[in-house]
Image: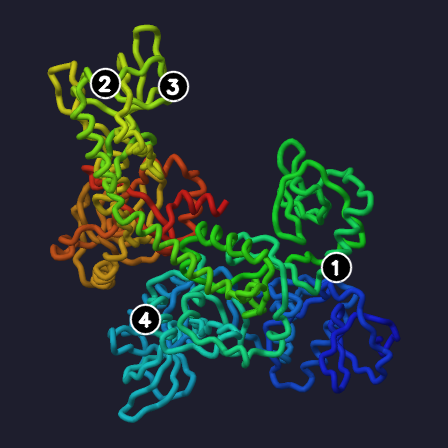
């Protein structure tokens, strides 16, 4: 009972000694002195209706901080605030949000009024690089979107001669400092004054510290720009003691400072750093570090963790990361739901249902009724639904109204995850099959211990509730490893010979480990005498026998595919080679080779090579003989690809991807890239041309095709260029050979001979026909334009006579056509 209005509300005891209560549907607290004011709830199975939230701010040290914040909220009880989630918590984990009341950001108002300071945070889903690592709990990232700003600051600092020397030390001052390891200048914050006129500085755009003797003053405009590196930390799950030195070393290896692109997932803002997850190709790198860390002993587990160790039934398994559990404390609730749904008359839904609508469906396997949620509306008035109390899905054509009493009850089946394992991830299908068999053996009854309840989904440790008490995670690993060894043993000799092929979708191979059987068959058939063979009289289709090939005068094992017209013979399939023949007669198989199964395995390539085909042939005067041809698919020799991919005789050819930046995109048939390997040489070239206007003589021999140094009007910097067209008034249209773009300019300088020798640093490309056919040109243009200066990859398939590369384009190592489909 709430002491203010004497009404009853659901509550949770947070201090049993002082009898302090938290009203879970409202968030406020109260203290009671009379035990009669507390009663057992009938609705404990329903989750709280309020969620704990926090703004990304902290007090500024003023005593009236709480009053100011409460004042804003008290004035807004009748208003509807808008929340912008920074982190998505639940009923037990705080969600950090930006709150807007009447369009005003509450956090910014408290900061502007002097009551609060902002916490450091960054949005989830940002692409970033690791710029410096001190440790797992102390590293710095640079957002990919800030790459252009970094380049502009770098260009500004190259003009160091225009900056004034530092006059005196002032802690915290932002200056330009020389990093003595690479002799380049960067923005830095003065930390400490050292002897011998040296300073300790923090390079604010990268996160590393160093000492230097050379510092220059920056303009207020450049110094006041926010730092372009963010200090971050990973979060250690509660079930582990600490990050180990091995995990720290692995983190340094994984992050590869500045080399890999990660995706951020915000966990918690902080006063001086941000707690995040780092995702690499969708995988949380914490999962690679935890196997190197020590778990807490069970005796050190928290009381809460011990309390949630309970009996449960596994109702459905999607994979090891999505397991549906019904906990034993909800057995009585499940009994009530089942009795109500199957013991009363349900009303069919009359209105057209939509995705996420709640309903009741009848499961075809047992004809029982279950609470369900619509996942997809299909054709022919059918629906794909998930049975929320069990986790499995089905397709139905009839829906029933869910009784009002059960609409607010949360799904009884809770989704949990086993601990991550590389062997499970690499062998998903085998792991799922093995896990299903293991759970069947214990009738899906398990003991559950929560390892990390704050994870999404919660991570649990499962043990079979039988005499064996098997740790399912450990036992599953052993079973999968044992099965993999068996598979490896079976495949130890996987080499094969292509015995017959009509297309990439239809060809036959003979496995080399069957060589002994094939030798026996060949020798047996070679020893046959025609007069001793018994002809099969009226053989049935698919019956096996021996046939004779006139083409090579050999006997073969065969299977009859069809019986032709009278006196026309039979169409037969050669069991050990894969091709078909028409033969006049078929004989009985010798007993010694009859039990041997067919040695020709029917195969097809797992993927198609592409859509651009080339075929070259040699002249052949004899028109009765086939032409000798070379088939190239996507500029690669088909025979070599086929042998490499299928037979295992050679190592399969792997695509060689080159990191690059798309600097000019005119369309899929014409664009320019700068290779990452050319960047150092390009930077040297750019540096040498920075003062071209003063250092180089004017160029007046203006004619088409001439090489020169020309000024790009937008940034007034000089670059290597080739004249495309001579215009009036001393102007020319030029092509900047190191960047691929064109412009009209009238400022030209002579190109020194030593600077004319290096090949151009932008490479002209066109997409291969297969990729073009799968891409929408407008979407591709937008995708590339919005990722200026970001890293792409190209696979060079061929180079045309004009120097144009035919390429496949990749982004984050995924083909651009696939990335476009994902973004739609």
Image quarter of residue 323: bottom right
Q: Mark 2 against mark 1, which lies toward the viewer?
A: 2
Q: Earlier in the sequence, mark 1 or mark 4?
A: 4
Is 390 displayed left or right of 555 in the figure? right
Please name whichever residue, 1 or 533, is drawn nearer the observer in this view of the structure: 533
Q: Mark 1 against mark 3, which lies toward the viewer?
A: 3
Report the disc number at residue 157.
4
Q: How many marks?
A: 4
Report the disc number at residue 333.
1
Q: CA distance from mark 2 to mark 1?
A: 76 Å
Q: CA distance from mark 4 to mark 3?
A: 84 Å
Q: Secondary structure at mark 4?
A: helix
Q: Earlier in the sequence, mark 1 or mark 3?
A: 1
Q: Earlier in the sequence, mark 3 or mark 2?
A: 2
Report the disc number at residue 33.
none
Q: Earlier in the sequence, mark 2 or mark 1?
A: 1
Residue 155 shows in this picture: yes
Q: CA distance from mark 2 to mark 4?
A: 93 Å
Colour setting: rainbow
Residue 15 picture location, percent across and down? 72, 83
Mark 2 surroundings within 10 Å by alpha-carbon count, few (fewer than 14), some (14 through 19), many (20 or more): some
Q: Which residue is mark 3?
A: 541
């Amino acid at each position: 009972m709430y002491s203010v209005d004497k009404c009853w509300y659901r509550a949770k005891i947070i201090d049993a000694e002082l009898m302090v209560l938290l009203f879970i549907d409202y968030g406020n607290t109260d203290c009671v002195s009379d035990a009669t004011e507390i009663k057992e709830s009938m609705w404990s199975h329903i989750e709280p209706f309020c969620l704990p939230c926090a703004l990304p701010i902290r007090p500024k040290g003023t005593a009236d901080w709480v009053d100011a914040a409460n004042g804003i909220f008290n004035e807004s009880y009748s208003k509807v605030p808008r929340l912008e989630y920074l982190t998505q918590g639940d009923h037990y984990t705080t969600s950090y949000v930006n709150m807007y009341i009447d369009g005003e950001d509450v956090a910014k108002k408290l900061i502007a009024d002097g009551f609060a300071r902002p916490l450091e945070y960054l949005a989830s889903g940002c692409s970033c690089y690791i710029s410096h690592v001190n440790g797992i709990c102390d590293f710095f990232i640079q957002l990919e979107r800030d790459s252009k700003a970094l380049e502009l600051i770098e260009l500004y600092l190259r003009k160091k001669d225009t900056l004034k020397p530092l006059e005196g030390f002032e802690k915290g001052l932002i200056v330009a400092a020389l990093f003595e390891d690479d002799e380049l200048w960067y923005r830095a914050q003065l930390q400490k004054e050292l002897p011998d006129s040296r300073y300790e500085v923090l390079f604010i755009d990268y996160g590393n510290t160093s000492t230097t003797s050379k510092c220059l003053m920056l303009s207020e405009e450049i110094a006041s720009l926010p730092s372009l590196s963010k200090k971050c930390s990973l979060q250690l799950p509660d079930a582990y003691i600490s990050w180990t030195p091995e995990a720290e070393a692995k983190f340094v290896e994984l992050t590869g400072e500045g080399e890999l692109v990660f995706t951020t997932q915000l966990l918690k803002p902080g006063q001086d750093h941000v707690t995040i997850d780092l995702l690499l190709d969708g995988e949380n790198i914490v999962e690679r570090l935890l196997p190197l860390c020590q778990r807490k002993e069970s005796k050190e587990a928290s009381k809460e963790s011990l309390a949630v160790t309970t009996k449960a039934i596994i109702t459905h398994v999607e994979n090891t990361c999505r397991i549906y559990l019904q906990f034993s404390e909800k057995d009585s609730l499940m009994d009530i739901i089942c009795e109500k749904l199957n013991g009363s008359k349900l009303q069919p839904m009359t209105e057209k249902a939509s995705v996420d609508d709640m309903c009741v469906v009848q499961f075809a396997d047992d004809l029982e009724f279950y609470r369900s949620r619509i996942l997809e509306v299909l054709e022919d008035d059918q629906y794909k639904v998930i049975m929320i109390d069990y986790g499995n899905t089905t397709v139905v054509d009839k829906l029933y109204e869910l009784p009002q009493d059960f609409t607010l009850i949360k799904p009884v089946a809770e989704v949990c995850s086993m601990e991550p394992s590389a062997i499970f991830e690499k062998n998903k299908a085998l792991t799922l099959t093995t896990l299903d068999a293991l759970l069947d053996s214990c009738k899906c009854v398990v003991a559950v211990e929560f390892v990390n309840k704050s994870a999404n989904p919660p991570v649990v440790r499962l043990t079979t509730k039988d005499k064996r008490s098997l740790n399912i995670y450990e036992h599953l690993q052993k079973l999968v490893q044992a099965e993999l060894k068996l598979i490896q043993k079976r495949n130890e000799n996987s080499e094969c010979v292509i015995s017959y092929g009509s297309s990439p979708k239809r060809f036959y191979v003979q496995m080399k480990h069957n060589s002994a059987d094939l030798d026996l068959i060949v020798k047996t058939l070679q020893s046959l005498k025609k007069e001793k063979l018994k002809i099969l009289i009226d053989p049935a289709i698919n019956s096996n026998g021996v046939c004779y090939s006139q083409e090579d005068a050999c006997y073969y094992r065969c299977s009859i595919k069809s019986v032709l017209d009278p006196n026309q013979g039979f169409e037969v399939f050669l069991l050990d080679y894969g091709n078909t023949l028409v033969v006049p007669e078929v004989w009985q198989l010798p007993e010694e080779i009859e039990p041997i199964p067919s040695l020709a395995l029917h195969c097809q390539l797992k993927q198609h090579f592409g859509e651009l085909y080339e075929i070259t042939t040699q002249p052949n005067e004899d028109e009765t003989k086939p032409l000798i041809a070379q088939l190239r698919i996507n500029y690669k020799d088909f025979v070599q690809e086929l042998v490499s991919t299928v037979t295992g005789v050679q190592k399969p050819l792997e695509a060689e991807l080159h990191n690059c930046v798309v600097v000019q995109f005119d369309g899929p048939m014409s664009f320019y890239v700068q290779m990452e390997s050319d960047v150092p040489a390009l930077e040297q070239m750019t540096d040498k041309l920075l003062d071209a206007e003063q250092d180089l003589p004017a160029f007046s021999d203006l004619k088409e095709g001439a090489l020169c140094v020309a000024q790009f009007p937008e940034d007034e910097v000089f670059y290597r260029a080739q004249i495309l067209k001579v215009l009036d008034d001393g102007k020319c249209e030029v092509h900047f050979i190191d960047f691929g773009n064109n412009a009209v300019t009238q400022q030209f300088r002579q190109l020194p001979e030593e600077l004319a020798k290096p090949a151009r640093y932008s490479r002209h490309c066109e997409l291969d026909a297969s990729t073009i056919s799968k891409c929408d040109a407008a979407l591709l243009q937008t995708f590339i334009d919005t990722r200026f200066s970001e890293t792409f990859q190209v696979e060079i398939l061929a180079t045309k006579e004009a120097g144009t590369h035919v390429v496949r384009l990749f982004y984050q190592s995924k083909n651009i056509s696939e990335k476009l489909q994902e973004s739609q």
